[in-house]
Image (tube, rainbow, N blue to C red):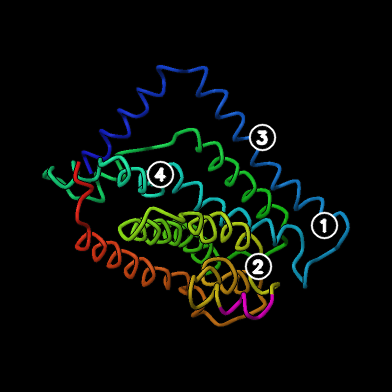
Amino acid sequence: MTLYLQSLKMHFKSLLEYKSSFIIGFLSQFLVFFTYYFIIIALFDKFDNVKGFTLYEVLLTFAIIQFGYAFNEVFARGIDKFDRLIINGSFDLLLLRPQKILLQVLCSEINYIKLSRLLQAIIVLIIAIVNLNLDWNIYKIITLILMLISSIIIFLAIFLLMASYCFLTVQGLEVRNVFTDGGKNLAQYPIGIFNKYFVIIFTFIIPYAFVNYYPLLFILGRLENKILIFSPLVVLLYLFISFKTFKWGMKKYTSTGS
């Protein structure tokens, strides 16, 4: 943990060497993110609801998914860009150092510019909560907290799976965008509004539904089963599988010869 905190400090110091670049990048990311927000606003300007879900209910799921994705873009960027380590041979150097591989990968790149997206997700989350006429209690608060944590975990798990794929090949990595950007754009809406086949895929193959759909139904009072409070914890199993897959990939790695 000490090494990771030192890495955070080092990356931040290097970023401040180019303050203008950081400010411009931060503002541009801030503006780009709000285009997604305005798209949802425009959608509900034409429709009162989407399969029974109102504007602020959708914004709640939007904020939760964007929060988890933005968090990983900031603090797990090294895993997201793992293919670069393989292509340029840097991964071989990591194997020689007396530190855990994943810790070194996490320290390799931290993108503070994406903090703007994390900030915006929090803003949209607050807007949604304030405008939702809900009877909040301790159970719903715990559920919301677990949804936010599980959103971070599921994208970390997906990044790990995509990193594992790099041990087999660095070609055709566009498939990564299907599960990261594509999955994010789909999961920012309640999964239940989609075709049943999509619901099955994003429940049992990539468990987005346990992040922002089933617990959402509990928060909204549409389902009363208290077991749904802990449904976001399903993603821990997904993270475990992703971690084991990454470890398996490392055993198959035979070096770039660098």
Earlier-in-chain disc, 1 versus 3? 3
Amino acid on which the number 3 mark rests in the picture: Leu
Within-10-Å neighbours for mark 1: few <14, some 14–19, many 20+:
some
Image vertical order of residue 9 relative to residue 250, above or below: above
Q: Which residue carries the number 3 mark?
A: 31
Q: CA distance from mark 2 to mark 3?
A: 24 Å
Q: Is 79 contained in the magenta span?
A: no
Local SS, label 1: helix
Q: CA distance from mark 3 to mark 4?
A: 21 Å
Q: Does residue 187 appear left or right of residue 253 in this picture?
A: right
Q: CA distance from mark 4 to mark 2?
A: 26 Å
Q: Which residue carries the number 2 mark?
A: 190
CB-based contact (under 8 Å), mark 1 and mark 3: no
> Which quarter of the rendered picture does the N terminus lie within?
top left
Local SS, label 4: helix
Q: Which residue carries the number 1 mark?
A: 44
Within-10-Å neighbours for mark 2: few <14, some 14–19, many 20+:
many
Earlier-in-chain disc, 4 versus 2? 4
Residue 248, image quadrant: bottom left
Q: Which residue carries the number 4 mark?
A: 77
Q: Main secondary structure of the magenta part?
A: helix
Q: Does residue 126 appear left or right of residue 244 in this picture?
A: right
Q: Residue at x 24, y 63 (%)?
A: 247
Q: Residue at x 56, y 54 (%)?
A: 181
Amino acid on which the number 4 mark rests in the picture: Arg
Toward the right, the furthest residue is 46
Within-10-Å neighbours for mark 4: few <14, some 14–19, many 20+:
many
Earlier-in-chain disc, 2 versus 1? 1
Q: CA distance from mark 2 to mark 1?
A: 15 Å
Query: Which span of residues is magenta-colored?
Result: 195-200
Within-10-Å neighbours for mark 3: few <14, some 14–19, many 20+:
some
Image vertical order of residue 203 relative to residue 161, above or below: below
